[in-house]
Every structure is written in C-alpha cells, then in structure tokens.
Image: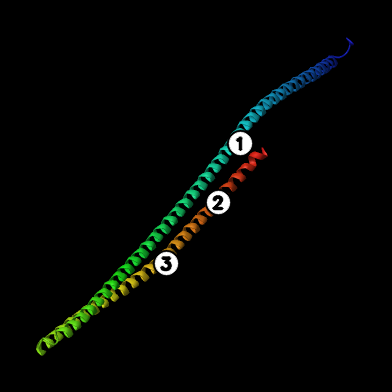
Amino acid sequence: MDETAPPTSIVDYDMELLSENFDVQTHKLKQETLKTLAEMKRKMHRHQTAQLAVQRQQFDRALSEKQSEIDGLRMALVELRGRAERDASREAEARDAEAAAAAAAAADAAERDGMALMAEEAARLRAQRVLDTCLRQRIYAANTMRVRLQWWKAVTARGRSRRMNEGIQRQIRENAHAAHATVADRIESLETELQSEKVAVQEGEVARARLEEDLKRAFMRGICALNIEAMSILKSGQTDAAPGAENSLPGGGM
C-alpha cells in the first residue's frame, strides 16, 4: 500500500476488501445453506419414503384383510344361497307330496263313494228280486186258492143253494179284487221306489263324475301354483345373484 496515497483511496480500498470478504462469506454461507438444505431434503425424502413404505405395507395388510373378509362373505353368501335352494327344493317336494296325498285321498274317497253307491244299488236290486219273488208267490197262492175254491165250488155246488153260491162268488170276487188291488198298489209303489232309486243312482254317478272333474281341476291348479311359485323362486334367486355378481367385480379387480 502506498503510504503517500490520499485517505480517500485507503478508505475505498478497505471498502473493496470488506466488500470482497462479505461476498466471499456470503458465497460460503450460501453454499453451506444450500448443502444444509440439500441434506435436509434428502433426509426428508428418505423419511417420507420410509413413511410411504410403512403406510403402503399397512394399506396392503388392510387390503388383504378386507379381501379375506370379502371372500368369507362370498363363501357365506354362496352357502346361504345353497341352503335357500335346498330348503326351497324340500318345500316344493313336500308340497308335491301333500298335493299327491290329497289327490290320492280324494280319489280313494271317490272310489269308496262309488263302491258304496254300487253296493246300495246291488242291495236294492236284491230287494227288488226278493219282492218280485214274494209277489209271484202271492200270485201263485191266489191262483191256487182260486183253483181250490173253484174245485170246492164244483164239489159243493150240488149241496148248496143258489144264494150260498152267489155269496161265495161275491166273496171270491171281493177277495180277488182286494188282493189284486193290494198287489197292484204294491207293484206301483215298488216301481216308484225303483225309479227313485235309479234317479238317485244316476245323480250319484253325476256327482261322482263332477267330483272327479273338480279333483282333476284342483290338482292341476295345485300343480300350476307350484310351478308358478318355483318360477318366482328361481327368478328371485337370479335377481339376488345379479347384485352379488356386480358387487364381486370391484373385489376381483383389487
């Protein structure tokens, strides 16, 4: 430094040196600050990376647990559907068995009623034959009595008076007329009873045919109702299966 230099020059020179030192110190401080910031960034990045790794592991574990829970729920849903289908099948079989048993019981009852009507008709026919036999026996007895009376009349005609003969003839006519009227009334009443029984038998046959037709219709209605109920159960099962399939897609994608 030149000692003879003016004071202003010395001050300027010191100021320049101070400015240079300040710049150097500022540059050093800036470099150290940048290094410190870079180191802090690296540490923060490593810390964040570690935290993200830990969070990712936790998320993976939670996702695995949720997936396991979803799989368990799916298996439970499949089992419940299988149980529901088995229960529906058993109920349908039970309904079919009840309908078949009811139809068989109705058919047996109708057959028993028909056999009872046939037995009643056979009994009526036997009674009619017995009545016919009795009538023939009575008619034969009346004819025999008439022949005997005629024979007795021929034998005793010579020893009896004309009035006695007239009285006997009148008595015979009255008895024959009464017997004929009684027999005719009995035959008419029996014919009326026979006609009424025939009408009753015909009505029983018509009722039996109507009962069989009603049983067939009831059986067909029961079968149609069971088919409709089975179709509704199948449709409801398919409707329940569609939301389950849609809900299973996001789980499968994970």
The answer to whether 56 appears left or right of 139 in the picture is right
Disc 2 versus disc 1: distance between alpha carbons?
A: 24 Å
Colour scheme: rainbow
Residue 177 showing in the rendered view: no
| Few, some or many residues within 10 Å of mark 3 (<14, 14–19, 20+) | some
Residue 152 showing in the rendered view: yes
Pick out the residue farthest to the top.
3
Viewer-nearest of labels 3 and 2? 3
What residue lies at 48% left-to-right and 52% top-to-bottom?
96
Disc 3 versus disc 2: distance between alpha carbons?
A: 37 Å
Q: Is residue 94 above or below residue 189?
A: above
What residue lies at 50% left-to-right and 44% top-to-bottom?
87
The answer to whether 85 appears left or right of 165 in the picture is right
Q: Which mark is residue 209?
A: 3
Percent of width and height locating residue 68: 61, 33
Which element is circle 3 on?
Answer: helix
- Closer to the N terminus: mark 3 or mark 2? 3
* Occupied quadrant, residue 200: bottom left
- Closer to the N terminus: mark 2 or mark 1? 1
Query: Which amino acid lies under the numbered mark 2 shown in the image of this protein?
Result: Leu
Disc 3 versus disc 1: distance between alpha carbons?
A: 60 Å
Mark 3 and mark 1 residues within 8 Å of each other at the beta carbon:
no
Q: Which mark is residue 71?
A: 1
Percent of width and height locating residue 52: 68, 27
Q: Which mark is residue 234?
A: 2
Q: Quadrant of the N terminus?
A: top right
Query: Which amino acid lies under the numbered mark 3 shown in the image of this protein?
Result: Ala
